[in-house]
Amino acid sequence: MKKYVFLCAISALLGGLLSTALTTRCLEPQLSAQDRPLPALGQAVVDELTPVERVNVAVYERVNRSVVNITTLIVRPDMFLMLEPPSEGAGSGSVLDQDGHVLTNYHVIEGARQVKVTLFNGETYDAQLVGADPLYDIAVLRVAAPRELLFPVEFGDSSSLKVGQNVYAIGNPFGLERTMTTGIISSLNRSLPSRNGRTMKSIIQIDAALNRGNSGGPLLDSRGRLIGMNTAIASRTGENTGVGFAIPVNAISRVVPQLIQNGRVIRPDLGITRVLQTDQGLVIATLTPGGPAERAGLRGFRIIKHQRRFGPFVNEEIQIDRDYADLIVAVDGQPVKSADDLLSAIESRQPGDETVVTVTREGRQVNVGVVLGAEE
């Protein structure tokens, strides 16, 4: 009997120890995971990263402080011309210089009563609109922040981009500040309709995730240089579908200095107000009276008026001579087949520049020099 009691005691003791050991072993990883401090991202951790991860980290650390969060307050009238309750909007932007200029999309701040910019350190400043270009959906804001808190983004070159090249988007989707997503350039030279009915050219298509709030944020190359500004996604819901679009940085570089200096873009004007598209080229329908094209001798439709008298009454008949009009086939040697082609051909020029318009007139080709005016 004593032997039996002793064996039971031993069994109970071993069982208790085993239970304690198992409990301790089960709890130990949890306690360790909670109590053990996370390592700093030092050299040891960097050495463990893959080459791709190192580039991701380097791009983010280089550009993070250049990205801002933009919030807007918009008040719109309803159908009865009463004011609706204010609504908030959000977008992203990039610091342009230490004078406080910030780049974003025009549609981010369009119609806003109030615009605020939040920097990387969480400090928020009221922003003033410096200038905007609705055609390319570009706007420049300005904030009165200390120079030491402003870290300008470095501009790259969008003319040398390749399909398949890695890209990085940093922005504030759904208000989640300075979120980075990665992807590749899916295509180049896309066209997008702009807000004023014209077409934006040379748009970059990417598959990096873009969502509401990413608009106006930077698109970067693997060196952290600005190569575009995220502006739109192909989506019926406003959520990411893997098809995003960015305005190329070279277009931004042409527009921003004018916005800072003039508050608007002064584009060249050819003085042709209406054209008809044909398989052979563009027929000039109407010209700006006294404008550049008319002064240079280009010809649109000719209006012929005939008066006929019927007793005391005079009847005036109007005939349109379409054969009199010039047919535009090229501008500065660049073939044009649409109104967009015509606008693109002079887009990079300045008012006062001379351009050569090649037309077919009465069966033969004629080169006409036109000194460009300024678009009103």
Image: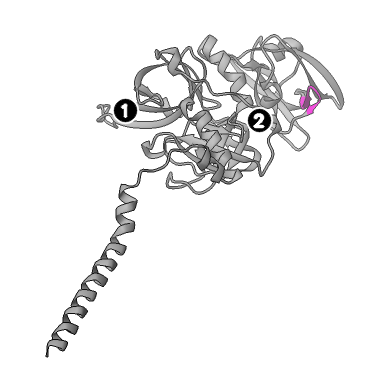
- Viewed as shown, does residue 293 lie left or right of 25? right
**Residue under label 2:** 158
Whichever of callouts 1 and 2 sits on the residue coming sooner in the sequence is 1
Amino acid type assigned to the residue bearing label 2 in the image: Ser
Position of 11 relative to 221 (above/below): below
* Furthest residue toward left: 1
Amino acid type assigned to the residue bearing label 1 in the image: Arg
* Label drawn at residue 231: none
What stretch of residues is rendered in magenta? 327-334
The residue sitting at 61% across, 37% down in the picture is: 204
| Mark 1 → mark 2, Cα distance in angstroms | 37 Å
**Residue under label 1:** 76
Q: Residue 328's x, y, as percent?
A: 76, 26
Q: Nearer the viewer, residue 234 or 319?
A: 234
* Furthest residue toward right: 364
Tell me the element at label 2. helix
- Viewed as shown, does residue 258 lie left or right of 93? right
Position of 144 relative to 234 (above/below): above
Colouring style = one colour
Is label 1 or label 2 in front? 2
For residue 195, say whether it is visible. no
The residue sitting at 71% across, 32% down in the picture is: 160
Q: Nearer the viewer, residue 1 or 16?
A: 1
Tell me the element at label 1. loop
Q: Nearer the viewer, residue 145 or 287?
A: 145
Q: Residue 61's x, y, as percent?
A: 50, 32
The residue sitting at 31% across, 58% down in the picture is: 28
Give the quadrant of the C terminus.
Answer: top right
